[in-house]
Image (cartoon, rainbow, N blue to C red):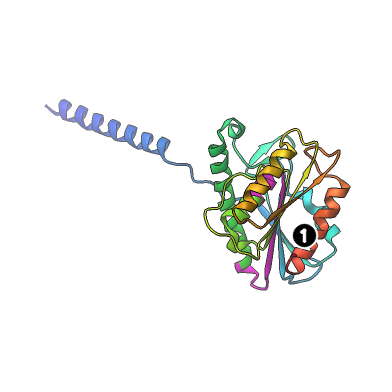
């Protein structure tokens, strides 16, 4: 008489195990913390923080020479994309480019939120920081722009380069915020006319944004672009930008 009861218990345990496995498989993935490096350059306790975001297939080391070229005291925050790609890392899953504009925007918003947490973490550890500038190229530019758009309380100025300028303001942005977009006029990935039209549209929505374009430059950086980048970033790190 014990066999039926034993079989019933085993069946119940089996069903419970299947239910638990199913719950685990459908539970949302909790992202692991982003890897980053942060260091003081030029002084023990700089009062400015530069958050620099690499392009897809690159790494935080891309920014080292450019940070040094600023020639001013600054603390850096250089996050690393969470997914390997080519010889470096990328920020989004492989299906990112296949998504709709809305899907791409959601991807960038989620990653920008994770980077915003890093900014809060570094500022909490270094209360001497008074100004924050974010910058990036390509996917990194998308993220720099999104940080200014969705987390303006954390950002004083942004310099997105080669960016799609995804998303629209969900609230009024501070008048003190400054955004400068830098882009090549021969960019085959992001047409320059589309960027100009997008900047004009955002200005019409009250966003404090302007754009500088560079002839004969594709989806890349150049000495002329980097000279403009240095001038804007250096001034933004040191005080208000006109």
Instruction: Give the residue drawn at x 59%, y 56%.
Output: 116
Going by the image, does 196 lie left or right of 104?
Answer: right
User: Could you say whether the residue bearing mark 1 is in a helix, strand or loop?
Assistant: helix
x, y percent for residue 24: 40, 38
User: What residue span does the magenta drawing correspond to?
Assistant: 124-144
Q: Is residue 116 visible?
A: yes
Instruction: Give the residue drawn at x 16%, y 26%.
Output: 4
x, y percent for residue 63: 78, 51
Work out which residue is located at the far left of the displayed protein and give it.
Answer: 1
The image quarter containing residue 83 is top right
Question: Quick one: label 1, few (<14), some, or many (20+) residues within 10 Å?
Answer: many
User: Mark 1 — residue?
Assistant: 233
**Can you say which quadrant of the picture contains the N terminus?**
top left
Q: Is residue 35 visible?
A: no
The one nearer the camera, 46 or 142, is 142
Number of numbered discs on residues? 1
x, y percent for residue 42: 82, 67
Q: Is residue 137 magenta?
A: yes
């Amino acid at each position: 008489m014990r066999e039926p009861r034993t079989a019933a218990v085993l069946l119940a345990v089996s069903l419970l195990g299947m239910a638990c496995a199913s719950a685990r498989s459908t539970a949302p993935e909790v992202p692991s913390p982003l890897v980053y490096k942060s260091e003081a350059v030029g002084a023990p306790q700089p009062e400015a923080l530069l958050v620099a975001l690499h392009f897809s297939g690159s790494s935080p080391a891309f920014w080292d020479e450019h940070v040094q070229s600023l020639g001013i005291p600054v603390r850096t925050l250089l996050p690393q994309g969470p997914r390997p790609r080519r010889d470096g890392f990328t920020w989004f899953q492989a299906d990112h480019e296949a998504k709709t504009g809305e899907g791409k925007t959601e991807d960038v918003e989620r990653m920008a939120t994770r980077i915003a947490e890093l900014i809060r973490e570094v500022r909490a550890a270094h209360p001497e920081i008074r100004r924050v500038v974010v910058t990036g190229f390509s996917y990194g530019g998308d993220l720099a722009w999104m940080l200014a758009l969705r987390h303006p309380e954390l950002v004083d100025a942004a310099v997105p380069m080669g960016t799609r300028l995804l998303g629209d303001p969900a609230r009024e942005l501070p008048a003190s915020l400054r955004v400068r977009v830098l882009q090549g006029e021969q960019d085959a990935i992001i047409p320059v006319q589309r960027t100009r039209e997008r900047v004009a549209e955002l200005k019409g929505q009250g966003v404090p944004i302007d754009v500088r374009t560079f002839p004969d430059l594709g989806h890349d950086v150049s000495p002329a672009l980097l000279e403009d980048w240095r001038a804007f970033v250096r001034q933004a790190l040191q005080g208000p930008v006109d």
